[in-house]
Image (cartoon, helix red, strand yellow):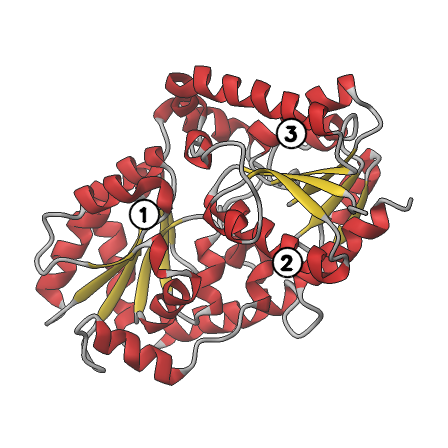
Amino acid sequence: MSGPLFYLIAGEPSGDRLGAALMTALRQARPDIIFAGVGGREMVAAGLDTLFDIDDLAVMGIVEVVPRLRTIMRRMRETTLDVLHRRPAALITIDSPAFSLRVAQRVRRQAPGIRTIHYVAPSVWAWRPGRARHMAGFVDHVLALLPFEPPYMETAGMSCDFVGHPIVEREPVGASDVQEFRARIGVGPVTPLLLVAPGSRKGEVGRLIPAFSETVCRLASRLDGLRVVVPVAETVIDEVTRGFSGLDPAPAYILPTAGERERLTGFAAADVALVASGTIVLEMAAACTPMVAAYRTSWLTSQIVRRLIRVDTANLVNLIAGGHPVPEFLQEFSTVEALMGSLLPLFHEGEQRTVQLEAFDLALTALGRGGEAPSRRAARSVLASLER
């Protein structure tokens, strides 16, 4: 006799990783669970037969969505119909609220008996606090990554469990793995190695690569023998490799097919990182790799967000640790000069590196390091919520 069907929806690589870990933990707790839904490479590897490629959804920003709106709306209709046809025991939406929560809302209107669980609480503490009240109309339970989020969700009328951030359950990369990685890409033990991660969405990659590429060129004139390694998300392979094609020497790319362990080893092997603000900030923290973060979106999107935002930083290390231990440059402030000025000191032992490493430790402890694996806590929370 078959077990319960869970329908999962993830719309971008970070959600895909969350979904895959959750699926694995759910199967460990209930081997008879059946999965359906929308996911990427990692969820497919975990056993999901995805309805379509999530590359269709990998877009962020108000202006950026417009050219792909027709495709997104079509995928939304297809997903909603698939959920209604399958009638799962639970609909689990994973981040990507612009897509996944709209599907959840449509499903609730037509099938109110399907229990909906949202994984990754929206950042209502940062902007648009009314989203929690809106979500409560079609979301029953929330899995929160940050310890201060449950009260926001519960006040709005949803149950919510802090399950911890998945970053803390990853197995640390060993020194021998780092040495082997550097040797594999032709980088000596004392050669400066910069990791450059321009994002996983086409819009952000297109806006960041010009400044990132120029910054690398200028750094190379100041740091003898500088080498670059670039992790590439499956959604932007062509954009990233084309954008950095002029660098000499050419970067070493970590492609999605290399696997998650290779990507994490690359993070730990780098001396310093230049990244797009986002989930990767925590990944650098877990790898103990000091960094500089930047982000650019369209002018119109930035003007709208600036009127709504309630915090002064976009990355979680700064939010949790307090202050601005990680230099962060947004929009017009993400200039080559600013990036250069913050990156150069990080290649040498000193206060800048020490401050970041202390902030990393504080942030990761707050996110659940040392406790039960977040994926297991999330799976237990999902199963318990179905009994309420």
Secondary structure of residue under mark 3: helix
Q: Residue furthest right?
A: 388
For label 1, the residue is 198
For the point 64% across and 53% down, the residue is 23
Q: In the image shown, does 181 or 25 lie closer to the viewer?
A: 25
Is the Cβ of the residue at disc 3 closer than 8 Å to that at disc 1? no
Q: Quadrant of residue 24?
A: bottom right
Is residue 297 depicted above or below 163 in this figure?
Answer: above
Is residue 329 depicted above or below 124 in this figure?
Answer: below
Q: Which numbered disc flags the more N-terminal residue, 2 or 1?
A: 2
From where the camera sits, is residue 163 visible? Answer: no
Is residue 93 depicted above or below 145 in this figure?
Answer: above
Secondary structure of residue under mark 1: loop
Secondary structure of residue under mark 2: helix
Q: Position of residue 220 (x, y in %)?
A: 12, 62
Please name which of the two marks, 3 or 1, marks the residue nearer to the observer: 3
From where the camera sits, is residue 339 visible? Answer: yes
Q: In the image shown, does 298 or 313 lie closer to the viewer?
A: 298
Q: In the picture provided, is 134 more to the left or to the right than 46?
A: right
For label 2, the residue is 24
Residue 101, numbered circle: 3
Is the Cβ of the residue at disc 2 closer than 8 Å to that at disc 3? no
Give the spatial CA distance, label 2 vs label 1: 29 Å
Query: How crowded is the residue under tag 1: few (<14 C-alpha within 10 Å), some, or many (20+)?
Result: many
